[in-house]
Image: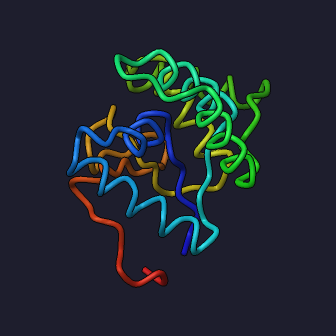
Amino acid sequence: MNPVFVDTSVLVAAEDVGAVALYAASLAWLDLLWRTRSGRTASQSLCEFYDEVTTAAVPLPQGDARAAIRRYQTWNPWLTDAATLETAWAVQARHQLAFGDCLAVACAQHSGCEQMLTLNLPHGMQFGGVTMVHPLHLPAPADAAS
């Protein structure tokens, strides 16, 4: 399976048991990415994840959030560098998206991903050669070779 970039919104959704369908769909994708060793993310996404889940209305305990981040560290998160910023600015100039989304797209590009799991950008759209995938609109493939 080709690598798939996972942005902050999906990482957070995988912790939100209150949104049952989205939680299940996000977990199914993450499970597939773990089994196929094809998950990718960025250090920025992990920082945002920690901030969001530990300050939510029903916060995740800091220790649990840290444990999750330690697991995602095995994906070798992309570190934002000058080239990544240039790519993010180019995506922003072309598509007029929020900078955080542009940075995620740039990280996906630099991580070699053709798909990005996200709740923030329209399913099926392409930005910078990366196709946006909403976990509820495209279930995780049952066949890991898909």
- Left or right: 2 as drawn, with respect to 42: left
- Residue 103 lies, with reference to residue 69, above or below; the image says above
Quadrant of the rendered image containing residue 46:
top right
Q: How many marks?
A: 0
Residue 36, position as x, y percentages in the image: 58, 74
- Residue 58 lies, with reference to residue 75, above or below; the image says above
- Residue 30 lies, with reference to residue 9, above or below; the image says below
Q: Residue at x 30, y 45 (%)?
A: 125
- Residue 73 lies, with reference to residue 99, above or below; the image says below
- Left or right: 19 as drawn, with respect to 86: left
Q: Residue at x 72, y 44 (%)?
A: 70
Residue 35, position as x, y percentages in the image: 57, 74
Q: Quarter of the image for the C terminus: give it.
A: bottom left
Q: Using the image as rendered, state which of residue 126 and residue 28 is in the foreground.
A: 28
- Left or right: 55 as drawn, with respect to 42: left
Residue 93, position as x, y percentages in the image: 47, 19
Colouring rule applied to residues: rainbow
Q: Residue at x 57, y 55 (%)?
A: 113
Residue 23, position as x, y percentages in the image: 31, 48
Q: Using the image as rendered, state which of residue 58 and residue 142 is in the foreground.
A: 58
- Left or right: 67 as drawn, with respect to 141: right
Q: Quarter of the image for the N terminus: give it.
A: bottom right
Q: Residue at x 47, y 15 (%)?
A: 55
Quadrant of the rendered image containing residue 28:
bottom left
Quadrant of the rendered image containing residue 48:
top right
Q: Using the image as rendered, state which of residue 7 and residue 25 is in the foreground.
A: 25
